Amino acid sequence: MRIQFDELDYQDAAINSIIQAFDGQQVRKSEFTIMDQDAQGKLFGNNGIGNKIDLSVSKLLKNVQQIQIEQGIPISESIPVPFPQFNIEMETGTGKTFVYLKSILELNKKYGFIKFVIVVPSVAIKEGVMKTIAMTKDYFRTQMQGIVYRAFMYDSKKLDDVQGFARNENSEIMIINIQSFNSNDNIFNRTDMDALYGISPKELVSETNPIVIIDEPQSVDNTENAQQAIASLNPSMVFRFSATHKNKSYPLLYKLGPVEAYKEELVKRIEVAGIKKSIDGNEAYMKLIGIKATKKSITATVEMYVKSNTSIEKKEVKFKKDDDVYIKSKRIAAYEKVGFVKDISAEPGNEYIEFSGEPSIIRLSQAMENDLQIKRAQIRKTIEEHLNKELKLNQQGIKVLSLFFIDNVANYREYDEENNRIPGPYAKMFEEEYEDVIRSEKYKGLRDRHVPISEVHDGYFSVDGKGKIKNTNGSSQADESTYQIIMKDKEDLLTFYDEAKGNVKKAHKLRFIFSHSALKEGWDNPNVFQICTLIETKDTITKRQKIGRGLRIAVNQEGQRVPGFEVNTLTIMANESYEEFASGLQKEYEDEGIEFGVFANDIFSSLVIAVDPETGYKTPLGHQKSTELVQYLKEQKYLDDKNKGTEVLAKAIKEGTFDIPESFKEIADDMKEKITTAIKEKFNVDKIEIKDKDNAVTVKLNKEALAGPFIELWEKIKYKTTFTIQLNSEAFIKQAADKLAEELEVRITRLEYERHRLETTGSGIETVKEEQTTFAVSEKQYEKAPDILTYLQNETKLTRKSIIAILKQSDTLRDFKRNPQAYMMETARIINAAKRLAIVDGIKYEKLTNGDVYEQSLFMQEEINSYKESIVPVHDNRSPYDHIIVDSAIEREFAENCERDPNIKFYIKLPPEFKIKTPLGNYNPDWALSLQQDGKEKLYFIVETKGSTASEDLRPTELGKIRCGEKHFAAIDTGITFKRATEQPAIYS
């Protein structure tokens, strides 16, 4: 099969933008007037024949501006010096290599230019360019009327090619990577090479004034040395092709970015699927990443959720002993029950963190086990997505491919003692899951169902001298040969396995490809429909590199493109949530220079205000007027400080009240409509939530209230305590066994699967949910029974004798076989909970003798933002702030009753930082208040407000914490009374 090349409108537009830049250059005459054509577009130098460009700078600028106006690109005001350079922006997968190769031939055909240099950043991209040249050879032969051209890869051992490049009269195309000529030591720059008689390859090339094509300039000329190297080629003109231009100082001739490519369905639509362990929404997510021990300290790195100003994000957080998890999370409620760090173990093979609350322990081995569950699930879901697409697309002649990225080749392939290849862990997982899935009745009609499992998957990896696969960095000599193999197999991978047609190669059977994560650029395949990331360490593949391997539109068995999103959907099986992938992808776009929703000063500069009826020349609004208009939008609060659209702008456009200055309306009759259309391209008004800001309230600190009554109350509650514990073993064993028998519920571990579609718009990347489900982990996870007694000993710190007694009395061991890991984890959790509850009965608090107290600075935050529905106004300086912030209807009623009760002299909603340490985790009391009735002695209370004060209605852990709180306040012995109340009047009872 050979890939067919169509005449695509957007590619022709890109090519024409390059051709039109030379408008006014002497046009090459007909192919038949041979005597004239040699003199045009050519320049004879000392050592060969070069390009001849005779355009004035002013004419070139005029050409460029007309091209930009036509495409709605902000216009340029000058041409770069010392040689013209232009940016061409084309999204990955839209055929930029094809575009610049055809542009080269069109420039030769129309203007007679013959010398071209293509500069690439890496071996991978160089191999990709050479593959495209080979694939397009027959197409260009028929399309370009027999133009003769030679394309070659620069090789310092073949300098005759460079000599031929300089002297030949036909089109010469040299492909060279920047590392070959950006140093004085490069052979390309040396004059002592006998093959060229004292002339350096650089001199020969520079005398030809080549037209230079830079592929991925952000990686080519991103250093001063590289920029000097490009200049040393003495280019007559430079065209810079990239999906993301970091250097935007060069005039942009053509723009087909991710937004335009998505809107026109020129690339695959992207779906992101994520898998995570199914947990209670109130569970505090924590994953132990690693532990570092030094002579002075032990620290642990934990992945958890952390609150920021605008969102909750998953981050890696450092912990040391006594750190409060709730504080580290920036006060996310779910982490309150975890408590503080009691201990950290760095013992090899027994790394863990112990907490005062729940979970009591998290282990590194547990995190690794969970990772394997997730990775197996990723593999299974990738197989399912793949087979589902085969059901739909095979009948259209489209072979479906899936790609797995791994960062350690031993996870896919290993070697036995005799150097025979054997499957690694991921290969075993793949074969087990594929065998299970393919048996489904749903897939019995698939054409390749009968192909042996071992032949449907294989890996592309670099090999060492003995033929063994190895980990590499993507740019070694071994990688170069791997890229060549990938490119060589490209068409075969797209071809169905078919014995009748003789399509029986290994690549014809192959549908699932494993590749090292270092081989992340320079190659792709149009029929990759699933990409799965199985990375153990930090993921070094950018999201753009991942999607880039499969963005191109799919082809059928005739090599023809099959357009449309109904066929072309790329599913990313991510090793993170869809939200993280989507936001990370947008950040990568922005880091690479794509500005979502930003109104730059020149954004309106190419709006057409007049057209010359005779010449067709279009007059643009221009930079000055565009800048004035952007400034007006900012003055009207339509744009914020970052030049992004505001709620005010969204409201004005939605309500039809948006307007522009009269001076702009006078420029052209439809100026307002043109400006509004341009704004909507950048700003999605439907996605902006118009909020009622009248409900916002700033709660302020009342410093006058931090005096007499406050000080009196504070003196009663400020003291800290410590506690000791005594435990009755026999009673505890019975209590633990009863609790285990009552509460233990062992389920097959379930994983959550979500799939979301990404929509790339002018204002950013948006997500649309398409599927959400849960499924059980594979039974393969449970084939090996773990050592339950050792595990429970480590988790609970109980003796083996006590654990055996609890398990026997509970009569729950029958559940162990259902899910050993879940049984052990749940049993450890329940025993530890029982232990903590038993501890409460035997706990004794004592006031600290060192004078350690809670700081008054807990009340020093000057302002707190809240909303009217969450506050109760404070009168008569009876609380530290001018409003009480409440979290429930019970708290609101309590605060309002305090305000109405003249006997309440002072009351405080205790801040979250006022925490009492308990063996069940930190306890935060609700209220402190002072009361004086009928002029009698003041009474002081700690009040716990709950929906119910009945012990049976409270969770055991919650009840235990409250009981510890009572013992704490009894121990400080300041005359404070502890009350549980559902309403404020109950404090009098």
Image (cartoon, rainbow, N blue to C red):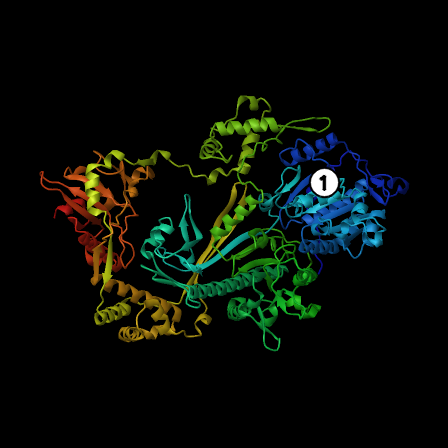
Q: Name the residue nearer the viewer: 199 or 683.
A: 199
**In the displayed structure, does residue 742 sit left or right of residue 289?**
left
Give the image location of residue 575, x and y in percent: 50, 58
Q: Quadrant of the N terminus?
A: bottom right
Q: Is residue 217 left or right of residue 670?
A: right
Q: Nearer the viewer, residue 3 or 285?
A: 285
Q: Position of residue 320 (x, y in %)?
A: 38, 56
Residue 881 sits above or below residue 203 on the image = above
| Residue 459 falls in image quadrant | bottom right
Q: Callout 1, which amino acid? A: Ile
Q: Is residue 148 visible?
A: no
Q: Is residue 557 above or below residue 174?
A: below
Give the residue at mark 1: 18
- Residue furthest right in the image: 35
Instruction: Tell me where residue 322 appears, x and y as whole percent.
Output: 34, 56
Establish if 89 lies above or below 295: above
Dot 1 alpha-carbon crowd within 10 angstroms: few under 14, some 14 to 19, many 20 or more: many
Residue 646: x %, y % from top left:
47, 35
The image quarter in which residue 365 lies? bottom left
Q: Height in image: 666 above or below 118?
A: above
Query: Under tag 1, what secondary structure?
Result: helix
Q: Quadrant of residue 492?
A: bottom right
- Residue 359 versus residue 432: which sits nearer the camera? 359
| Residue at point 68%, 45% (across, down) | 225
Give the total of numbered labels: 1
Q: Is residue 351 visible?
A: yes
